[in-house]
Image: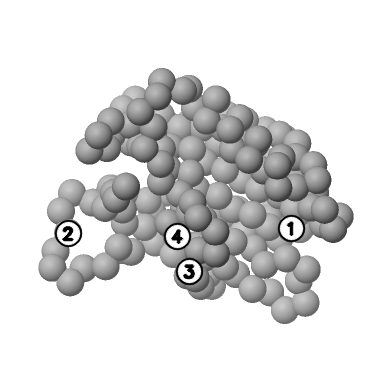
Amino acid sequence: MTLPLGFDVPEGWTPVEPEEPGPVFVAVRPEPGAEFTANLTLGVRQRPDPASLEEIADEAVERLAQATAAVDVVDRRAVGAPPAPGLTQTLRLRTGEGLELRQVQVHLTVPGPDGRVVLELVLTASGEAAARLVPDFRHFVASVHVRRKTLAGEGEQS
């Protein structure tokens, strides 16, 4: 599904091709000597079903539980308001290699061409780096918007 999105990439982040199916946008922030490279992702999914945002967030936790050694929901809150309600959650992850990570997820709903579309914006970083990078993530989330019309030659990022 395509949805004309615009967003700002925070300074210091480098867009890269997604390695896995799912995200439509990925940016990384390499730090010399770090065990893990922090990343921002943006996924877009059409949701014809009536699943609540809590159920959608639970699905995201379940996907992570299948790929990591442990996942704990640290915090979950409703955000936004109709017609575009959202939910944010903070997760603590442990990889099979024993690496401790933090993930901040924002699930936003927007009206789409064929019903409801859910945007999943995610910051994944080491616990130490996450605290420093949350302001960048907030900037990224706040900048995401659906374009009304695109001009010839205009890119997806704004």
Q: Nearer the viewer, residue 19 or 128?
A: 19
Q: Earlier in the sequence, mark 1 or mark 2?
A: 1
Q: Which mark is residue 104?
A: none
Contact between labelled residues 1 and 4, with CB atoms less than 8 Å apart: no
Please name the residue that numbered disc 3 is placed on.
17
Q: Earlier in the sequence, mark 1 or mark 3?
A: 3
Q: Nearer the viewer, residue 22 or 36?
A: 22
Q: Quadrant of the C terminus?
A: bottom left
Query: Farthest residue in the right direction?
Result: 98
Q: Earlier in the sequence, mark 2 or mark 4?
A: 4
Q: Earlier in the sequence, mark 4 or mark 3?
A: 3
Q: Residue 154: which quarter of the image?
A: bottom left
Q: CA distance from mark 2 to mark 4?
A: 18 Å
| Amino acid at pointer 4 | Phe
Q: Which mark is residue 126?
A: 1
Please name the residue that numbered disc 2 is placed on.
150
Mark 2 closeness class: few <14, some 14–19, many ≥20 residues within 10 Å: few
Q: CA distance from mark 1 to mark 3?
A: 21 Å
Q: CA distance from mark 4 to mark 3?
A: 7 Å
Contact between labelled residues 3 and 1, with CB atoms less than 8 Å apart: no
- Against 72, is 95 above or below? below
87 lies left or right of 29: left
Q: CA distance from mark 1 to mark 2?
A: 37 Å
Indicate the secondary structure of the residue bearing disc 2: loop
Q: Which mark is residue 25?
A: 4
| Amino acid at pointer 2 | Thr
82 lies left or right of 126: left
Q: Nearer the viewer, residue 122 or 23?
A: 23
Q: CA distance from mark 2 to mark 3?
A: 22 Å
Residue 54 on image: x %, y %: 55, 25
Residue 45 on image: x %, y %: 41, 41
Q: Visible in this render: residue 92?
A: no
